[in-house]
């Protein structure tokens, strides 16, 4: 995915909000830093990979995950949101449907499960183009889907985050959950890769 992204405007707004919170005594700067550091220390795509591997090996968990992602990931000790609660919706890739996530307004994203968002996810180029021409964008990532595969684009919001449940690779029946999790990339959890 090509395109540049500048976080300068967002960074200025965040810093201004932090300053206002500190000036009004709502929170001390050090306390805010501690909350952010604690949250980010537990944010990793390995978490989403672990959720995926469990869904691949446990049909009952998979059903719960697709029905109520927020509750299902909580079973594994993961909160879907960060500072404020968010709903997690997990969408499953199938033989005839491929899912991809985006946040067209900003870069809403399930950080706890996917780690910090990649710069391309935040770029205006990705956010605008994946909605209009998803097949072309996915091809730029090296993901070439058959023409008959339906592509569904899910737009995250401040209340709802999405995660893609990739298709389990063939010939992986003998692998453990840990070995399966090692196969899953962050891009697969976003939908810009198959695994």
Image: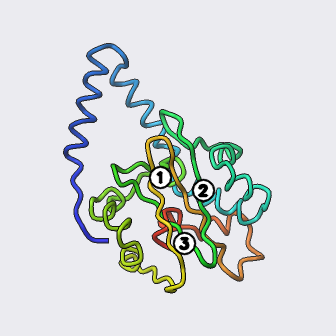
Is 12 left or right of 153, judged from the image as shown? Answer: left
Classify 72 as above or below 182: above
**Which residue is depicted at the point 41% across and 77% down?**
135
**Which residue is depicted at the point 38% across and 31% down?**
33
**First in sequence: mark 2 vs mark 3:** 2
Look at discs 1 and 2 and give the one toward the viewer: 2
Q: Secondary structure at mark 2?
A: strand
**First in sequence: mark 3 vs mark 1:** 3
Q: Quadrant of the N terminus?
A: bottom left
Mark 1 Cα shell of 10 Å, populated few (<14), some (14-19), many (≥20) = some
Classify 191 as above or below 156: below
The residue tagged 3 is 98
Looking at the image, which is closer to me, 115 or 178?
A: 115
Looking at the image, which is closer to me, 161 or 26?
A: 161
**Which residue is depicted at the point 26% across and 16% down?**
23
The image shows residue 131 at horizontal and vertical percentages of 38, 65
The residue tagged 1 is 115
The image shows residue 104 at horizontal and vertical percentages of 35, 55
């Amino acid at each position: 995915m090509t395109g540049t992204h500048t976080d300068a405007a967002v960074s200025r707004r965040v810093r201004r909000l932090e300053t206002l919170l500190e000036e009004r005594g709502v929170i001390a700067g050090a306390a805010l830093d501690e909350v952010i550091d604690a949250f980010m220390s537990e944010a990793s795509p390995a978490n989403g990979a672990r959720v995926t591997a469990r869904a691949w090996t446990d049909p009952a968990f998979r059903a719960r995950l697709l029905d109520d992602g927020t509750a299902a990931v909580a079973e594994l000790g993961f909160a879907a949101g960060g500072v404020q609660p968010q709903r997690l919706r997990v969408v499953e890739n199938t033989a005839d449907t491929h899912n991809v996530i985006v946040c067209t307004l900003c870069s809403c994203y399930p950080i706890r499960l996917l780690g910090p968002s990649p710069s391309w996810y935040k770029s205006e180029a990705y956010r605008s183009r994946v909605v209009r021409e998803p097949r072309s964008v996915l091809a730029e990532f090296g993901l070439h889907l058959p023409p008959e595969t339906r592509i569904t684009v899910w737009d995250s919001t401040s209340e709802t985050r999405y995660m893609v449940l990739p298709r389990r690779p063939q010939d992986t029946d003998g692998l453990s959950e840990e070995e399966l999790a090692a196969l899953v990339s962050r891009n697969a959890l976003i939908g810009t890769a198959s695994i």
